[in-house]
Amino acid sequence: MWLEILLASVLGFVIYWFVSKDKEETLPLEDGWWGPGVRPTAGEDKSIRPFKVETSDEEINDLHQRIDRVRLTPPLEDSRFHYGFNSNYLKKIISYWRNEFDWRKQVEILNKYPHFKTKIEGLDIHFIHVKPPNLPSGQTPKPLLMVHGWPGSFYEFYKIIPLLTDPKNHGLSDEHVFEVICPSIPGYGFSEASSKKGFNTVATARIFYKLMLRLGFQKFYIQGGDWGALICTNMAQLVPSHIKGLHLNMALILRNFYTLTLPLGRYFGGLLGYTERDMELIYPFKKIFFSLLRESGYMHIQSTKPDTVGCALNDSPVGLAAYILEKFSTWTNSEFRDLEDGGLERKFSLDDLLTGIMLYWTTGTITSSQRFYKENLAQVNKHETLKVYVPTGFAAFPCELIHFPEKWVKTKYPKLISYSYMPRGGHFAAFEEPELLAQDIRKFVGLQEQQ
């Protein structure tokens, strides 16, 4: 009898193993048309056109007139950044923007890398494409697609690009030299916004995949944080055979057994696979939980009625600056909300911050960028339940909005080959800590190419 029970148990285990074994399922590639009206019967123009950022006296004068008419509400005493952007410090931003910020000079800086546009699925897609200036003899550059998030832009990558494309002249080994492509998400900056509902990260991933094919890359590396992390994840789910490696500095892991163990982790962290550093970054959970509540109000607005707040932000440059720059304060370090100036200038220059604002203001894309939340978060998506079966690297920055332990990341990305606890930095990793992020990308690529 015991032998029969044993055999039945073994058989049951084998059946269970086969049934529950992970299937390397992919997302269907499909196709789309996001331009206005009906898709034309003629084939799409696949030409790649040079593009240049430009400005005008009219654009600058309009900005200055709107800034001059600003109407601010005095902050509460000792409120610092606890109620949002402190209007006393905002006066300093306004004064600098109006009297010292040189948009024409910043436009020249934006144009230091080559810009292009091309039509894909009915949308004009903007991107910068930076090739290595000094490629070692006999070496082929590694194509790397880098994708931004909200409220960011391609400009976030300007300081990391030379570390990747010209490492030797920046104190790094030239073992890994990259050719970097940074597109603007449709509806952000210089990429045309969708005219139709439903444009989400999967559609964006498919468009960026087509962009890489159009540039002649069959296999390439991809990197992202914020929305860029999800777009790159979706690319790996759509076309895994074309992705040499996926590097992330944020993860969106919504359906995970380990997230349910958070209340127990403080007491049984070791049994659940948490390291000592994980425990430091996750607990006390009550503090992290309330911090997330404080920082996620914008998400509810943008996931439900993005056009309403968009009307106000697209009409007021000062309102737009306050709304966006507040994120660059508290998402860089949650403790910055205890400071009168939000700590903004501890990590960033006003020129860099205002350049980011101008990319939303001059293109009028704040509303279309916010719609991305509604399109992605208003319904359940298939990709949330699918794992990613490409080699993955993860950089865990300590001041990110939420910490993802290696155990969590590996449930979504089983081929995780590199996980790094970064010594400092927050949500805007490439913008804030370009050297650290570049080193971790190079480390991951080195490990991947050894396999």
Image: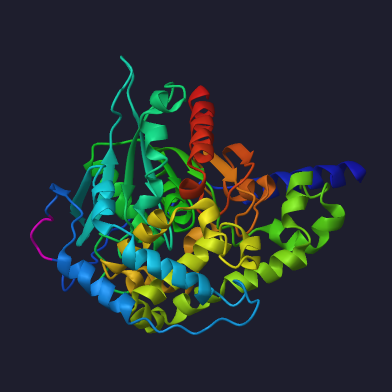
Name the residue furthest top: 137
Task: Looking at the picture, tell me which residue is in the foreground, 318 or 117.
Answer: 318
Look at the picture and state if 277 lies above or below 40: above
Residue 240 location, x and y as percent? 42, 43
Residue 378 location, x and y as percent? 47, 75
Is residue 261 visible in the rendered image? The answer is yes
Task: Looking at the picture, tell me which residue is in the foreground, 410 or 368.
Answer: 368
Judged by its main secondary structure, the magenta piece is loop
Image point 29% across, 52% down: which residue? 106
Q: Give the range drawn in magenta.
A: 40-44
Task: Looking at the picture, tell me which residue is in the foreground, 198 or 313.
Answer: 313
Q: In this view, does 3 lie to the left or right of 391?
A: right
Residue 301 location, x and y as percent? 48, 79
Residue 389 belongs to the span the image colors magenta: no
Image-quadrant location for residue 254:
bottom right
Name the residue furthest right: 2
Q: Is residue 169 left or right of residue 378?
A: left
Q: Is residue 318 left or right of residue 115?
A: right
Look at the picture and state if 292 lies above or below 144: below
Image point 65% across, 58% down: which residue? 256
Image-quadrant location for residue 297:
bottom right
Task: State the colouring used for the structure image.
Answer: rainbow
How many numbered marks appear? Answer: 0
Residue 16 location, x and y as percent? 69, 50
Image point 70% across, 68% down: which residue? 289
Image point 35% across, 71% down: which residue? 366
Is residue 199 visible in the rendered image? The answer is no
